Amino acid sequence: MTAASKQLETSHRVREGSPWTGLWAVVFKEMADLLTSTRMRILEVLILLTAIGASYAAMSQIRQTIGRDVFLFLKLFTVSQAPIPSFVEFLSILVPLIAISLTFDAINGEFNRRTMSRILSQPIYRDALLFGKFLAAFFTLALVLTVIWLLIIGLGLIGLGVAPGGETVARLLIFLLATIFYGGVWLALSMVFSITFRQPATAAMASLATWLFFLIFWNILAGLLAAIISPVRMGLPQEVLHNAQTQITLARFSPTFLYGEILSALLNPAVRSVGLGLLLPLLPQGAIPGSALPLDQSLLLIWPQFTGLIAATILLFALGYVLFQRQEIRA
């Protein structure tokens, strides 16, 4: 067998190999591009200023409770001082923006640069390309959020001089994980629009419009729909309760609402229920003063919401996968 025939046979085996051939090459290449891009530098400056400002405002409010509050570090993320919002309020805006900026041109950018056919002519399958781009954006988002998380804790250690307890660290770790998957929903949604629309600007605008709809208008629309589905005609308690339950059910179609419920139970251990009062972020309607739920009980409260965020990420990515597989790619 000649050298040319051996090389041809090896190339044929690579092309006929696993659909995941080239997956990690795509992941590492995309991560390198994302982490060194100009947009990431801008986001890093914005994140740094946000973390420092929110931490300073929170520490100035909670220094007087040192020694009396077991969950002091949790307040670093929830306490605010006018006119600076709390850090979780910043996160509810920053996380979708970071996620959308990472994937709004992930697929259509390749088409516009006319590099998609070149990439797929290599021993890289469509499956590996799409999974690689999503995983690269997901790992980049996780890295950015972990750095923010460590920065806030480090500033708290310096500013407060008190180390967090074991349960506090566990709550903060779960909070970080929930925030990553909350960002994963917007990553997958932005990638769906990147596959659907050929212009990156259109995909970015569609992603931002969807985020603003769920952030601002969906709770209002849920209240209007609940009044139609479960009207309160006589003012009876059961009618009011049924209307409230319908409104909660509709509101939970919003990733922002699910994330707000998770934050309320994790960062405020006194919260014993999540529901209608959480239509506004971190409103502890289920809190009992002076009491705190153990971590496992708080996790039982938010487990459906946590699962919902993961399921939404998977479903949106599956939709993007189907759309991408059906697209025609020409040289």
Image (tube, rainbow, N blue to C red):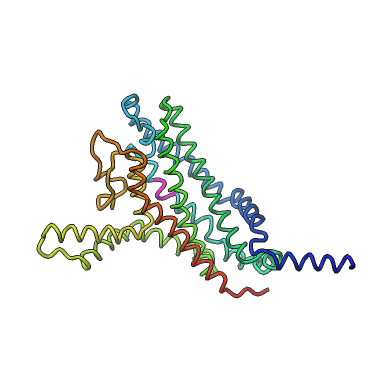
| Relative height, residue 47 to residue 202 (above, below) | above
Please give left or right for residue 95 compared with residue 68 in the image. right
Identify the residue at image location x=58%, y=58%: 133
Residue 84 in view of the camera: no
Camera-side residue of 21 and 142: 21
Identify the residue at image location x=49%, y=36%: 151
Residue 142 in view of the camera: yes
Q: In this view, which residue lies farthest toward the right?
A: 2
Camera-side residue of 58 and 312: 312
Camera-side residue of 189 and 167: 167
| Relative height, residue 75 to residue 3 (above, below) | above
Q: Position of residue 123 (x, y in %)?
A: 71, 64
Q: Magenta includes 105?
A: no
Camera-side residue of 243 and 190: 243
Quadrant occupied by the N terminus: bottom right
Magenta stretch, residue numbers = 90-94
Q: Position of residue 281 (x, y in %)?
A: 31, 48
Q: Position of residue 94 (x, y in %)?
A: 44, 49
Which corner quadrant of the image does residue 130 belong to? bottom right
Main SS of residues in magenta: helix
Q: Position of residue 150 (x, y in %)?
A: 49, 37
Quadrant occupied by the C terminus: bottom right
| Relative height, residue 318 to residue 306 (above, below) | below
